[in-house]
């Protein structure tokens, strides 16, 4: 509705007055419900063509998290447990950061922008509280993270019924009708999942279209609704989601009993669990004939496995992928020669070979991501694990 109003406003003014660059932003977490992905891509393409035809000066962008921040790399690679209300590591990485990074890149050092969002008070009581709690200046709110960005919420006081009444009475300016959108929402029996700018409101999976992997909500009503209305793809995806819930529960033995920082408590998914999840994901990918995980993500997962607490030999991912899909995936390094060299250096430095391997992999992981911040802390954690595992009490 907000995009339609902006396109309508632009059409109503002369070409000479359309001087401000306008971008339509949409995020695809790479684990979106398939029916939504299709509709989003189609709509964005229509918007792009309409803007070109009518000289509206609108650019259209489908933003995705980089491979290092995707659901699979964090879950299967780093071993983050499937997200819940207390550890919701996904929204910031997969939805908020891609938008913030795009805005920062586009604005440069001095630019300013207004972000028009479709957030409404009627969506939930916490969203209503958030919107009511932020001070308004000239009808705009400050963006929580971006200093030169203001936020406008032009439809914040409309009810869901009013939004649908508008959409069903007004065809989108870029063509087509909103009937298909209406059908999709009706089938899913849910609400909506707008662009997020903060994590203070409940998950966008809460009776809205969230990720099909979302374990923050108890039930994924949107996926269930789509399945009940004939979208067969959702059946096996919902089964995989059940598996994620099983892994999330520490009582089921898939979680380390030490946290990532080394303290006692519910920790990351153990290596056996990560391998099981990758196998099941590849099975789902084969069965659904949908590309669910990219080769780049697989390589990153391998990288994380090498520096995990129970490190893999550097070929675990390739073995699983080859066994499943016959997709060639080779570790180009000469593993045997490297292992020999590592064993020698480890002995010289008084470390276990596994610890040295984890240290090296951690450095590789950081250098592949072109960052150094936090590396020292990560290396210290690995050395602390080594001290604990090889302490005199344990040796005795
Ligand atoms: S829908 Fe769920 S999994 Fe996806 S970003 Fe939102 S909270 Fe995370």
Image (cartoon, rainbow, N blue to C red):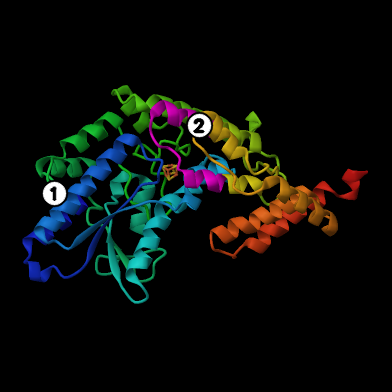
Judge left or right: residue 245 versus residue 195: right
Please provide percent x and percent y for residue 107.
33, 70
> Mark 2 = which residue?
326
Nearer to the camera, 312 or 39: 312
Judge left or right: residue 176 versus residue 104: left
> Mark 1 = which residue?
174
Q: Residue furthest right?
A: 396
Q: What is the number of the mark on residue 30? A: none
Residue 121 against residue 366 in the figure, above or below: above
Residue name at image x 58 percent, y 61 percent: 367
Q: Quadrant of ligand 1?
A: top left
Q: Is there any visible trace of residue 245 in the rendered image? A: no
Crowding around mark 2 (Cα neighbors within 10 Å: few <14, some 14 to 19, many 20+) is: few
Residue name at image x 51 percent, y 49 percent: 89
Q: Are marks 2 and 1 in contact (CB under 8 Å)?
A: no
Residue name at image x 76 percent, y 53 percent: 341
Nearer to the camera, 285 or 244: 285
Span of residues in magenta: 278-301
Observer-side mark, 2 or 1, equals 2
Q: Quadrant of residue 146?
A: bottom left
Magenta segment: does it hold 289? Answer: yes
Please provide percent x and percent y for residue 62.
31, 51
As measured in the structure, the alpha-carbon distance from the residue carrying label 2 to the one carrying label 1 is 43 Å
């Amino acid at each position: 509705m907000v995009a339609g109003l902006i396109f309508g406003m632009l059409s109503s003014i002369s070409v000479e007055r359309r001087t401000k660059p306008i971008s339509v932003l949409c995020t695809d977490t790479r684990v979106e419900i398939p029916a939504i992905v299709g509709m989003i891509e189609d709509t964005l393409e229509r918007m792009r063509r309409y803007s070109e035809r009518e000289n509206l000066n609108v650019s259209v962008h489908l933003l995705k998290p980089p491979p290092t921040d995707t659901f699979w790399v964090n879950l299967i690679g780093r071993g983050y447990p499937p997200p819940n209300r207390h550890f919701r590591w996904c929204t910031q990485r997969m939805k908020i950061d891609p938008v913030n990074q795009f805005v920062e890149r586009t604005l440069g050092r001095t630019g300013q922008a207004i972000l028009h969002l479709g957030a409404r008070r009627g969506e939930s009581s916490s969203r209503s509280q958030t919107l009511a709690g932020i001070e308004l200046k000239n009808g705009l709110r400050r963006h929580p993270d971006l200093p030169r960005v203001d936020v406008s919420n032009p439809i914040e006081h409309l009810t869901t019924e009013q939004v649908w009444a508008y959409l069903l009475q007004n065809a989108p300016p870029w063509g087509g009708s909103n009937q298909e959108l209406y059908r999709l929402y009706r089938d899913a029996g849910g609400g909506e999942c707008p662009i997020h700018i903060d994590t203070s409101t409940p998950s966008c999976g809460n009776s809205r279209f969230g990720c099909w992997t979302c374990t923050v909500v108890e039930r994924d009503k949107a996926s269930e609704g789509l399945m009940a209305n004939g979208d067969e793809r959702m059946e096996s995806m919902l089964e995989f989601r059940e598996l994620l819930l099983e892994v999330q529960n520490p009582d089921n033995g898939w979680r380390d009993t030490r946290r990532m920082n080394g303290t006692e408590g519910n920790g990351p998914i153990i290596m056996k669990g990560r391998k099981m999840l990758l196998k099941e994901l590849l099975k789902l990918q084969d069965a659904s004939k949908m590309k669910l995980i990219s080769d780049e993500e697989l390589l990153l997962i391998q990288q994380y496995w090498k520096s995990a607490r129970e490190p893999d030999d550097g070929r675990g991912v390739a073995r699983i992928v080859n066994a499943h899909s016959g997709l060639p995936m080779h570790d180009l390094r000469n593993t045997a020669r490297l292992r020999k060299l590592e064993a020698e250096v480890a002995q010289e430095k008084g470390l276990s070979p596994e610890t040295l391997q984890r240290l090296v992999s951690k450095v590789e992981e950081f250098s592949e991501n072109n960052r150094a911040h936090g590396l020292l802390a990560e290396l210290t954690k690995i050395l602390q694990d080594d001290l604990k595992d090889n302490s005199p009490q344990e040796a005795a």
